[in-house]
Image (cartoon, helix red, strand yellow):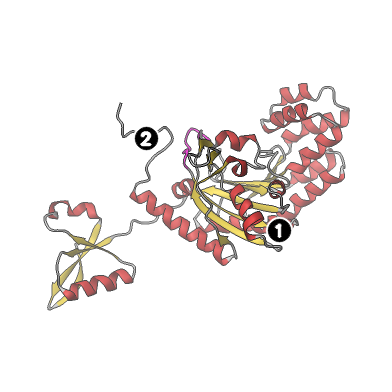
Amino acid sequence: MRTWLLPEYVEDILPNEALGIERLRTRLLELFRVHGYELVIPPLLEYTDSLLTGTGSDLDLRTFKLVDQLSGRMMGVRADMTPQVARIDAHLLNRKGVVRLCYCGTVLHTRPRSFTATREPMQLGAEIYGHAGIEADIEIQRLLRTALAACGLGDARLDVSHVGVFEALAKHAGVDEKLEAELLEAVRAKDRPRLRALVERLEPRSREAFLLLPELYGGREVLERARNALPAYPELRAALDDLEAVLNANGGPMGIDLADLRGYHYHSGIVFAAYHGGLANAIALGGRYDEVGKAFGRARPATGFSLDLREWVRLAPEAPPAKAILAPYSDDAKLRERIDALRAAGEVVIVELPGHEQTRAELGCDRQLVLKNGNWEIVSL
């Protein structure tokens, strides 16, 4: 066996992709900064007691765990930075008003999300804490739209849903925890035969409502269909009103899918996902998660989104490769001054070390510094 082989779904990031990731990271974090989002950097490792608080079993299964040699306690390598940022808001910042935070870092998954995904995504995201109103949901979705446009992905479609619709139906149907979990799985999978068998013993109004959920996807017309066909429970109507508000406030392609209930035990309101081109999987995920702050002992309404920079850099329009200037190896003071000035202006200048003229093409230079009439001038290679 070759000892230098990496684990499955783990890979090195080579120079071109690494440069693209760094450019995208810088662009997006600066975009977030000018919108008032402050950067935080949570630790790679935490005790699982806090790392997995309020996140449900899905994140637990995706988290690598190990025993801390100093304390003997169980630790986890973060699989999602969002709960960490919620902890920072709840216990370290302790602000009373609205807090806007952003973050970027590598996370680790025990299994890839799909056959084409990595187990080591580079997660970047933004979160708003302290405002329970729909205005925060609208702001965070607009920020995602702006981020997509800044990366050349402005034609992405945003699909929205609301976990309150299913939650209201389950509550008024009086289903127990086991049946609720089975209904949730069937609705998410749009498994109509399974769903039909599960709702057979429910009263007619609840039965028809659950059977309709997988069909409630499409454009704005879905809201009207839902208002006319679903029971007029106050919580359900409020959820549909929230969806209408975000549709009215957003520009660009939008869709609705009331069967999109991912993170049902984690999210507490509007959820959304961005899709690009013909890709089946979302390229960004977000939503409201008010209950996570409560799990940390300080209830704070929250909403946000996250994305994988490694995925976005492969989707974004490829920037033309930056060419460099080749400089000879020399102790000439004027040459050093010229190189310093060019680098200060943003040019890449590579000094060719002696004896490597035969591999010059590998450096990616399209110009060179040549001494002419006592001055170091740039000429084409």
| Residue 35, horizontal then vertical, whole percent | 59, 65
Image quarter (top left, top right, bottom left or bottom right) of the C terminus: bottom left
Residue nearest the viewer, comparing 290 with 84? 84
* Residue 192 in sight in this render: yes
Over which residues does the magenta segment extend? 111-120
Where residue 6 is drawn, which disc sits there? 2
Residue nearest the viewer, comparing 104 with 23? 104
Residue nearest the viewer, comparing 110 with 172? 110
Is residue 310 in the magenta section? no
**Quadrant in the picture for residue 332:** bottom left
Q: Where 272 sits versus 67, above or below?
A: below
Q: Is residue 162 left or right of residue 310?
A: right
Q: Secondary structure at mark 1?
A: loop
| Residue 228, horizontal then vertical, whole percent | 84, 41
Q: How many marks?
A: 2
Mark 1 and mark 2 lie on one chain; the one further toward the N terminus is 2
What residue appears at the point 75 percent right and 35 percent down from the top-left corner?
Answer: 213
Image quarter (top left, top right, bottom left or bottom right) of the N terminus: top left
Q: Main secondary structure of the magenta part?
A: loop
Badge 1: few (under 14), some or many (20 or more) residues near its Cα, within 10 Å?
many
Residue nearest the viewer, comparing 300 with 246? 300
| Residue 380, horizontal then vertical, whole percent | 20, 65
Residue kind at label 2, given as amino acid type: Leu
Where residue 130 is drawn, which disc sits there? 1
